[in-house]
Image (tube, grey):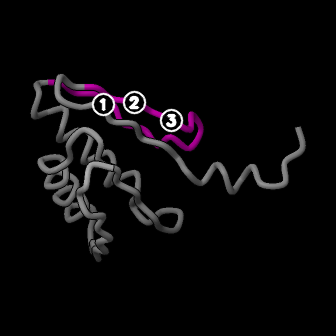
């Protein structure tokens, strides 16, 4: 831990445009070592927010990339000169519960 206090923030985002604006704002704030966790039902906009954050961050560094949902790949990574962003679908753990291999 780096001594920064943890914060739990809740947002009511009434539109995809509002979600994109929040993602762009977060992109200006996140730094190496930060952890952003998103929680919500299927279709709540978690991937839309992550996509906006990643695309905005990459754009700040002259980069661009497609940002798909990690639902099937489980993990997507994006890198700029300032930051490595790892986008993980955490719901996979719940889907694996009780699975016999």
Residue 67 relative to residue 17: left or right: right
Task: Pick whichever, 19 or 9, lies toward us.
Answer: 9
Q: Are marks 3 and 2 in contact (CB under 8 Å)?
A: yes
Q: Residues within 10 Å of mark 1 (few under 14, many from 20)?
A: some
Q: Dominant secondary structure of the magenta stretch?
A: loop
Residue 13 relative to residue 87: left or right: left
Quarter of the image containing the C terminus? top right
Q: Secondary structure at mark 3?
A: strand
Q: CA distance from mark 3 to mark 1?
A: 13 Å
Which tag, 1 or 2, sits closer to the chain's start? 2
Q: Secondary structure at mark 1?
A: strand
Residue at 30 percent across and 64 percent down: it is 6
Q: Which residues are magenta?
A: 63-79
Q: Which residue is mark 1?
A: 84
Q: Residues within 10 Å of mark 2 (few under 14, many from 20)?
A: few
Q: Are marks 1 and 2 in contact (CB under 8 Å)?
A: yes
Circle nearer the viewer, 3 or 1: 1
Residue at 84 percent across and 54 percent down: it is 98
Residue at 18 percent across and 38 percent down: it is 57
Q: Which mark is residue 54?
A: none
Residue at 27 percent across and 49 percent down: it is 2
Task: Pick whichever, 65 or 10, lies toward us.
Answer: 10
Is 58 above or below relative to 47? above
Residue 68 relative to residue 73: left or right: left
Q: Which mark is residue 77?
A: 2
Q: Which residue is mark 3?
A: 75
């Amino acid at each position: 831990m780096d001594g920064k206090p943890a914060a739990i923030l809740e947002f009511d985002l009434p539109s995809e445009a509002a979600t994109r604006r929040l993602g762009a704002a977060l992109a200006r704030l996140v730094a190496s070592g930060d952890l952003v966790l998103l929680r919500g039902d299927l279709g709540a906009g978690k991937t839309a927010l992550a996509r906006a954050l990643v695309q905005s961050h990459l754009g700040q560094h002259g980069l661009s990339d497609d940002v798909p949902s990690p639902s099937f790949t489980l993990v997507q990574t994006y890198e700029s000169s300032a930051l490595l962003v790892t986008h993980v679908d955490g719901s996979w753990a719940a889907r694996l519960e009780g699975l016999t291999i």
